[in-house]
Image (cartoon, rainbow, N blue to C red):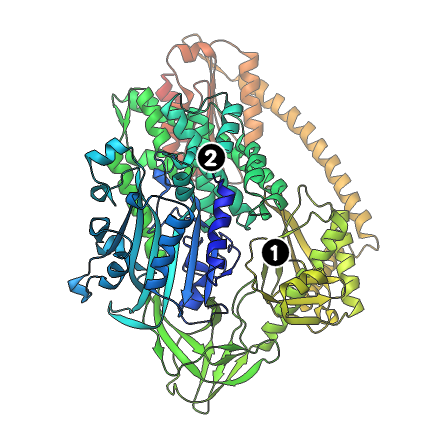
């Protein structure tokens, strides 16, 4: 029986034999495509080629791509663990043709690989073809059906509707019919009772799709119409986990050697056995699936967080923790203990897992511990909500309460329902779903972008010239209008551009397009599917006029200084802290730089100063830039260039070198380190478990900072009569202030004792109770001390109400002996009612409560009100 690793290898080797170039998997986390957070299909890394933005280096390629599907069109998260074949992270085996072969070849090879190489029984295979769409003017895909007919009888070729058999990249863009290959893994008896063709695309767990062959032959325009693509594309995707299941003769993906080693360790750690309890089995499958997603995401540079892609990863991790908490009895972090078995099984195919193992474990452990604390908080809040519902005679908690637990405290709704059921209560599901819809609508409204079709003025590809020029003569290739947040903008593609498009942490250039007729501001430059897009608030009136593209050189120079400085920082951190330091993200703007790196403890002030001194020494050396463009990647590695985990590099790369600092980089840089001027680290902080962040400024911004510091010192000196030793003067002032404060505290204690004694002298005896009432010009702490002292001195038959004013803020204080509480008085209720007279509110315990307000003129009336309410 073939192992999972052998099956993966056999696929790419088969297509290599058919003239395909084997390419590595792209990162699962996408950094430079605003339309996607994660790689959700094998074709994502080839979008720029498919869209015609970039020429194909190879006409035929094949790979195994790590993918993640949890949101949007492909939302499988809630099914994961409950069935046998849905996953969050999965591998997609694929082969592509960019304008080379088409339907005939790919259908023949698919049959050859499945039947002749893998020895699957063709009687168990069914294929679907697009049945056509009259409203789109599309006929049945008879071409594909005809090729399939060479290999399968008619009853194994099934018509599929538009939903299943017409693939689209998005609302616009390349699309076309597709052919799915399904396999029937049922028993012979089941097959005899019901033909497999009747179960295709019917969600039967043993009749599943394993391979989809997509024939991209159209382009969908913004108005919905279709036009033929000039270069047709083949894009196939085969579910690796499903294929392994089929070849290993299992009925569940989780029974294969992809997941079983992980599930065994889960069982060892939890003391549970897989197969004994359906609920435990689901939890084990959830954890086994999710551990892969979380580990690969962290490896690719996406840490759990509260925003965008980071929030998705955090949500997946918390789902796994919740299942482990509820069904596996795991009240302590334990998922991080599964990382070694994952690395052992997948580290060969994906060596980045092994390289990042310590970071993965550290981040995962901290995230688990954080969420377990959240779970405890949520359970306490839910207990309070349940008690309130029961006290009010209700059997259901509101959807708003359930949503608040979910949205504000991260408490899963299904766990809320589980705990409620155990306590004989339910949740208003419709109300919860309504709140969820409102949130989704808010998110959609915030992110909604209305995009028009590209208007092409001339054919061509953009040439980036920004490494050598900041001004360049160019022309517009195409443009389109977009609307977002009630703002209309225009995206412009140029034939040549010196504008750097936002990527690699560096913000995009701004500047102008200048023709003899007009000047157009470029407010940003971004990259979409590897295409530099210039954003403007208006279009040139003369679109076909030659123009100069001019970058804002001041901003560019400041960005370049900050970007080069991040390289020097990276090297210095590795030198001071150790070679375990890896860059985990950066932000380079004209004003500052931010550098995230892996390190497992706070960097000390002494270490930071050493790093800063090392970088500034490199700056003073004025080391010239050595730049290698289009360097074969193996040559770059021989140079010792540092590559970033989670980045996709081609066969040729750009390398930036400043002396011993050598890195893969596509950003803009200074011509020599001296142009950075100087660096000053502003802060060092934690971003996530095992990841630290440095924020710094360079050049003129350092001057501005020093000017501010000098001005502050001069102002301080002036406050201390220009003392020659400012530190000594401040120390003397602090010591004197501490002495005066101590004297003041002693004076206040004497005053409190004096006031307390006077209050006791003036107390009234009403029905055997000492009633003390006063209005005092004293701070709140002093009044509280007096109240506690009174209660300590008179432990029985005491009632005290004190109104006080300090800095024009009124305060009511009520305390009483325990026997008065037992008699039915409640200090909290009394101050809440009386606080209305001082335009305020408050509360507290039955024996002691306070209330603040805004109206000191009402204080006497409020004190009298409390006496009245208490019946004295």
Of the numbered discs 2 and 1, the one sitting upstream in the chain is 2
162 vs 681, left or right, is left
* Residue 178, x across and y down, in percent: 30, 58
**Tally of numbered tags:** 2
* Residue 222, x across and y down, in percent: 28, 68
Query: Looking at the image, which residue is at 54% across and 30% down?
Result: 333
**Callout 1: SS:** loop
**Nearer to us in this view, 819 or 196:** 196
Query: Looking at the image, which residue is at 51% across and 47% down?
Result: 297
**Nearer to us in this view, 444 or 766:** 444
30 vs 613, left or right, is left
Q: Quadrant of residue 486?
A: bottom left
550 vs 380, left or right, is right
Give the foreground label among 2 and 1: 2
Return the residue found at the far bottom. 516
Q: Which residue is mark 1?
A: 644
**Callout 2: SS:** helix
Return the residue found at the far right. 724
Q: Which residue is mark 2?
A: 288
* For residue 415, above or below residue 511: above
* For residue 206, above or below residue 509: above
* Residue 458, x across and y down, in percent: 39, 83
Q: Quadrant of the C terminus?
A: top left
Cβ atoms at labels 2 and 1 below 8 Å apart: no
Say the numbered circle drawn on residue 153. Answer: none
Q: Is residue 271 visible?
A: yes
* Residue 703, x across and y down, in percent: 70, 66
């Amino acid at each position: 029986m073939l192992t999972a690793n052998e099956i993966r290898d056999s696929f790419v080797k088969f297509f290599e034999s058919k003239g395909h170039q084997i390419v590595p998997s792209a990162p699962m986390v996408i950094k430079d495509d605003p339309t996607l957070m994660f790689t959700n299909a094998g074709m994502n890394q080839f979008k720029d080629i498919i869209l015609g933005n970039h020429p194909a280096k190879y006409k035929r390629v094949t790979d195994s791509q790590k993918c993640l599907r949890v949101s949007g069109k492909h939302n499988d998260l809630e099914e994961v663990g409950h069935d046998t074949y849905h996953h969050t992270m999965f591998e997609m085996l694929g082969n592509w043709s960019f304008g080379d072969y088409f339907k005939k070849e790919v259908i023949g090879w698919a049959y050859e690989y499945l039947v002749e190489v893998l020895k699957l029984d063709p009687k168990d295979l069914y294929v679907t073809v697009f049945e056509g769409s009259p409203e789109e003017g599309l006929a049945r895909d008879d071409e594909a059906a005809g090729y399939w007919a060479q290999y399968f009888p008619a009853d194994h070729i099934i018509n599929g509707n538009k939903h299943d058999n017409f693939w689209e990249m998005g609302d616009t863009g390349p699309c076309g019919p597709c052919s799915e290959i399904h396999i029937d893994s049922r028993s012979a008896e089941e097959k005899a009772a019901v033909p497999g063709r009747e179960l295709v695309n019917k969600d039967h767990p043993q009749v599943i799709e394993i391979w989809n062959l997509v024939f991209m032959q159209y382009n969908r325009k913004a108005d919905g119409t279709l036009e033929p693509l000039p270069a047709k594309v083949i894009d196939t995707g085969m579910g690796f986990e499903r294929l392994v299941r089929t070849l290993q003769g299992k009925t569940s993906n989780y029974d294969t050697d992809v997941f079983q080693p992980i599930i065994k360790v889960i069982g060892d750690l939890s003391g549970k056995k897989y197969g004994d309890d359906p609920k435990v089995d689901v939890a084990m499958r959830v954890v086994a699936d999710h551990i892969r997603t979380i580990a690969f995401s962290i490896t690719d540079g996406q840490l759990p967080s509260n925003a965008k892609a980071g929030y998705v990863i955090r949500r997946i991790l918390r789902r796994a923790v919740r299942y482990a908490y509820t069904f596996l009895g795991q009240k302590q972090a334990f998922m991080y203990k599964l990382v070694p078995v994952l690395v052992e099984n997948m580290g060969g195919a994906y060596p980045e897992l092994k390289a990042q193992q310590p970071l993965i474990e550290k981040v995962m452990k901290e995230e688990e511990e954080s969420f377990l604390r959240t779970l405890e908080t949520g359970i306490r809040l839910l207990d309070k909500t349940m008690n309130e519902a029961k006290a009010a005679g209700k059997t259901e908690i509101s959807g708003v309460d359930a949503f608040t637990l979910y949205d504000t405290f991260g408490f899963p709704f299904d766990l809320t329902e589980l705990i409620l059921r155990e306590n004989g209560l339910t949740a208003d599901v419709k109300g919860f779903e309504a709140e969820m819809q409102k949130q989704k609508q808010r998110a959609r409204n915030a992110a909604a972008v209305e995009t028009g079709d590209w208007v092409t003025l001339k054919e061509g590809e953009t040439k980036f010239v920004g490494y050598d020029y900041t001004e360049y003569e160019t022309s517009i290739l195409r443009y389109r209008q977009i609307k977002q947040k009630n703002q209309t903008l225009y995206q412009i593609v140029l034939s040549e551009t010196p504008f750097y498009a936002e990527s690699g942490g560096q913000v995009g250039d701004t500047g102008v397009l200048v023709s003899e007729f007009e000047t157009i501001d470029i407010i940003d430059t971004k990259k979409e599917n590897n295409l530099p897009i210039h954003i403007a608030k208006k279009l040139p009136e003369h679109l076909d006029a030659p123009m100069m593209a001019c970058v804002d050189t001041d901003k560019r120079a400041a960005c370049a200084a900050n970007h080069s400085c991040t390289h020097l920082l990276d090297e210095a951190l590795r030198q001071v802290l150790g070679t375990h330091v890896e860059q985990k993200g950066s932000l380079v703007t004209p004003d500052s730089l931010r550098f995230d790196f892996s390190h497992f403890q706070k960097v000390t002030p002494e270490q930071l100063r050493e790093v800063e001194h090392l970088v500034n020494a490199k700056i003073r050396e004025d080391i010239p830039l050595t730049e290698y463009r289009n360097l074969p990647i193996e040559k770059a590695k021989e140079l010792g260039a540092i590559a970033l985990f989670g980045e996709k590099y081609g066969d040729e790369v750009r390398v930036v070198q400043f002396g011993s600092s050598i890195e893969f980089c596509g950003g803009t840089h200074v011509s020599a380190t001296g142009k950075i001027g100087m660096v000053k680290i502003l802060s060092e902080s934690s971003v996530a478990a095992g990841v630290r962040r440095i924020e710094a400024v360079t050049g003129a911004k350092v001057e501005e900072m020093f000017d501010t510091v000098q001005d502050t010192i001069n102002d301080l000196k002036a406050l201390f009569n220009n003392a020659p030793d400012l530190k000594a003067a401040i120390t003397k002032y602090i010591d004197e202030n501490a002495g005066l404060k101590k004297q003041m505290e002693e004076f206040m204690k004497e005053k409190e004792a004096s006031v307390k004694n006077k209050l006791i002298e003036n107390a009234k005896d009403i029905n055997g109770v000492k009633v003390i009432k006063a209005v005092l010009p004293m701070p709140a702490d002093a009044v509280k001390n007096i109240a506690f002292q009174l209660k300590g001195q008179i432990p029985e038959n005491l009632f005290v109400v004190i109104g006080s004013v300090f800095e024009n803020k009124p305060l009511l204080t009520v305390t009483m002996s325990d026997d008065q509480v037992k008699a039915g008085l409640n200090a909290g209720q009394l101050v809440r009612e009386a606080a209305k007279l001082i335009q305020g509110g408050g509360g507290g315990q039955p024996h002691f409560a306070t209330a603040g307000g805004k109206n000191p003129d009402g204080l006497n009336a409020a004190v009298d009100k409390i006496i009245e309410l208490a019946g004295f």
